Image: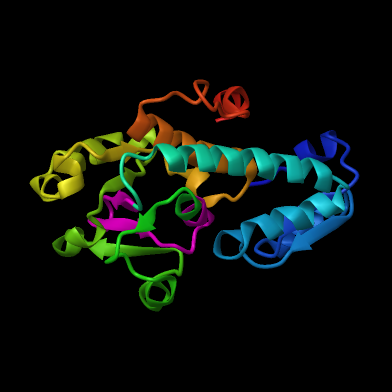
Amino acid sequence: ETDPELVAAGAPEILISNEWFPEMNDKLAEIAPVVVMKGDASETDWRAHNRAIAQLVDAEDRLDEEFATLDARIADLRSRLPKENPTYSIVGYDPDAGTLSVWTSAIYSAGVMEQAGFVMAPNVLSPEDAGKIGYAALYNLSLEKISDVDADYIFYVPRGDEEAAADQAFVADPVWNSLRAVQEGNVITASLPWGPHFTRPNVPYAHMVLDEVYRGILDQAPTEGFANPYADWLTANN
């Protein structure tokens, strides 16, 4: 939860928020002018969303440079994949419900993955169908249908330390181990619990999504090869 006192201590000239927290926005407006962004950038054009913010702070030129570096790194990664158009899915285990949490192509990182040459596993629900049973970007899948998420590569999003035991028990479960990706050693565990870099659309996190592929498929650290320009910052701030 945002702490208005901490925000005020930074003496901001402008604040950028979203429409989900109107009461908090009213409090923030007492500190500095608040620009409320409409919609969820995870489910829309995340680049346009970031450009709108850049326009507010007169930083479009810098954003263009950031996008150019990101695109070059995506192209490098795509050229080095071991196969063309590999399929993938992004999942996590929900111990409370006893189901898989499955992210759809509505999240911004799906666009990054697609640009890098990946294709969402064909049995993962579309955002439209997912929205009928959950959210456009995320839905729960019963373990009886776990084969729906099987793919060339599965990105597994662990939960926080307090639920690490549940993750460990799940990945040892025969149901999970029945998947082809698991049997072939093609499961990539996300570097951050809860996988915020997969769902929070910004350039540093987009690079971190690429890091998962470089590390998990090409065995390359973020500081090696076509290095992540935000590697040190991400390490220090996550």
Horizontal and vertical percent position of residue 211: 47, 34
> Quick check: is 95 in the magenta stretch?
yes
Taking the spot 57% from the left edge, 49% from the top edge, the residue there is: 200
Q: Quadrant of residue 3?
A: top right
| The C terminus, quarter of image | top right
Q: Quadrant of residue 65?
A: top right
* Residue 182 relative to residue 210: left or right: left
Q: Residue at x 30, y 60 (%)?
A: 121
Evaluate whether residue 151 shows in this view. Answer: yes
**Residue 76, magenta (yes or no):** no
Front position in the image: 200 or 52: 52
Q: Which region is colored magenta?
A: 86-112
- Colouring style: rainbow
Tell me residue 175's x, y (percent): 11, 50
Relative depth, front residue between 6 and 57: 57
The residue lying at 67 percent from left, 42 percent from top is 68
Viewer can see residue 192: no
Tell me the residue at 41%/25% (across/down): 220
Q: Which image quadrant for residue 138?
A: bottom left
Q: Is residue 212 above or below residue 125?
A: above
Residue 83 position within the rendered picture, expressed as x and y whole percent measured from the top left:
31, 45
